[in-house]
Amino acid sequence: MNYDLDPSLLQKTISAALERGGIYADVFVEHRVSQSIRLQDSKMHEASVGVTSGAGVRVVEDDRQGYAYTDDLSEKALLDAARVASLIARNGARADAADLRAVAVKPRYSVDAQAQATGLGDLNTYVAFLERIDVTGRAYDKRIETVNGAMIGEVQHVQIATSDGRLVNDTRPLIVLSAQIVARDQVRGFASYADGGRTSLAFYEKKTPEAIATEAARIAVINAEAREAPAGEMPVVVGAGSGGVLLHEAVGHGLEGDFNREGTSLYSGRVGERVASELVTIFDDGDIEGERGSISVDDEGTPGQHKVLIERGVLRGYMLDGMNGRLMGTASTGSGRRQNFRFLPIPRMCNTYMPPGDSTLDEIIRSVDRGVYAKSFAGGQVDISRGDFVFMISEGYLIEHGKITAPIRGASLVGNGPAIMEKVVAVGSDARLANGQYTCGKNGQMVPVGVGMPTVKISSLTVGGSALQ
């Protein structure tokens, strides 16, 4: 189905947006179809199908942006929105709108996903997947008390027209299947696990609902058996894959262009300086096929890109949208993203990860006499201006005399992002992206992202726990 607006209407809208002045204008048109269903206590709940359509018109002048949006895609509504956005113009400088020309983009989504772009699949398939989650989760262990789950799918079609003459289309699939399981032994143990990405239902032929339920049940049972976590400064080994959420929160946000242009990040003005151990390299990629954070183009029409943020401990660059790139004297890195047409684009991460080093997991664990193995995280908070963070460990273990021993519960990691990057003393050879379940919040906007890293040893970090020493 064709959801595109006529290019002549988009051209007219951009011209109206620049009537009072402005150096740049664009129109972001969105049509999104989504469906979801939730499993609770072996029953299906809250099945929904939604359709969202609308457009946002932006005018940029210096470091100011005028923005108006409408869910009415008629010519009158678009022109009204353009004229409201144009009220930002003050100094009379005005750019001429170039003639729109279609720009081809390389799709970052699988062939199956592209084939599914006109539909989300039968809702009965969602129900069948959740029933398999329920059966598998409950059969895993007699200590399993509760099995919940959810399946969400969407197809977002966007059309982006810019005053510099670009007309870009993108169709983005996104799907995720999750399980939340509670077990009870010594204590109540909870776990949540999910997977998906910019792909289709065919994804779950390999990563089956049974595999997702089993992983959630495994972690729930471990947490039900866990002992109280120790507290204090000690070596911490961060697990491969999902440990990347620590990288995302503690470092990645500090490398987003808006914070650095405004001088509110600890990394501001430090390109070319050493900011981490020479073992640390960090990439952000928008162009990995099928991953949850991948984009053929960002929400300003710039292709998703591979960005080197930190290379062997040296800061190489930031993640930039168009406005912040221009104000910093460089180009967009394809990082301008938004939740939907009701929001302005801002610099955001895509898939943020650390490439492999040369140590094995066994070598890293053997090097720790007493510490914590933080295999995965349940979430956390970070202060961008100072880099301070707190993260809860969802699956963790003691390391005693070079061996992984008892599981621990209620553990958190407290530290400072730039500081711990200086304390990275070993990087594993087991780098991988985490399962596709992460969503990032910033300025009230949520966007799907990917995270990943190899096993990493941090020489010293504060572990928050309650066990008596």
Image (cartoon, rainbow, N blue to C red):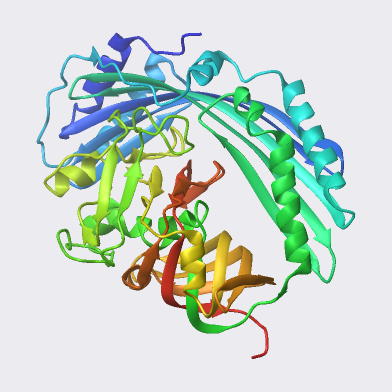
Q: At 79% from the left edge and 56% from the top edge, which residue is drawn?
A: 182
Q: At 87% from the left edge and 40% from the top edge, which residue is drawn?
A: 42
Which is nearer the eye, 95 or 355? 355
Q: At 49% from the left edge and 60% from the top edge, which residue is drawn?
A: 361
Which is nearer the eye, 207 or 403? 403
Q: Is residue 452 left or right of residue 197?
A: left
Horizontal and vertical percent position of residue 225: 78, 68
Q: Does residue 374 sit above or below 164 in this rendering? A: below
Quadrant for the C terminus in the image: bottom right
Horizontal and vertical percent position of residue 386: 34, 71
Q: Does residue 41 sit above or below 99 in this rendering? A: below
Q: At 56% from the left edge and 16% from the top edge, which residue is drawn?
A: 116
Residue 24 can be seen in this image = yes
Q: Is residue 34 left or right of residue 109?
A: right
Q: Is residue 67 left or right of residue 224?
A: left
Residue 297: quarter of image: top left
Residue farthest bottom in this picture: 469
Horizontal and vertical percent position of residue 349: 37, 46
Q: Does residue 324 sit above or below 223 in this rendering? A: above
Residue 337: quarter of image: top left
Which is nearer the eye, 328 or 352? 352
Horizontal and vertical percent position of residue 418: 33, 69
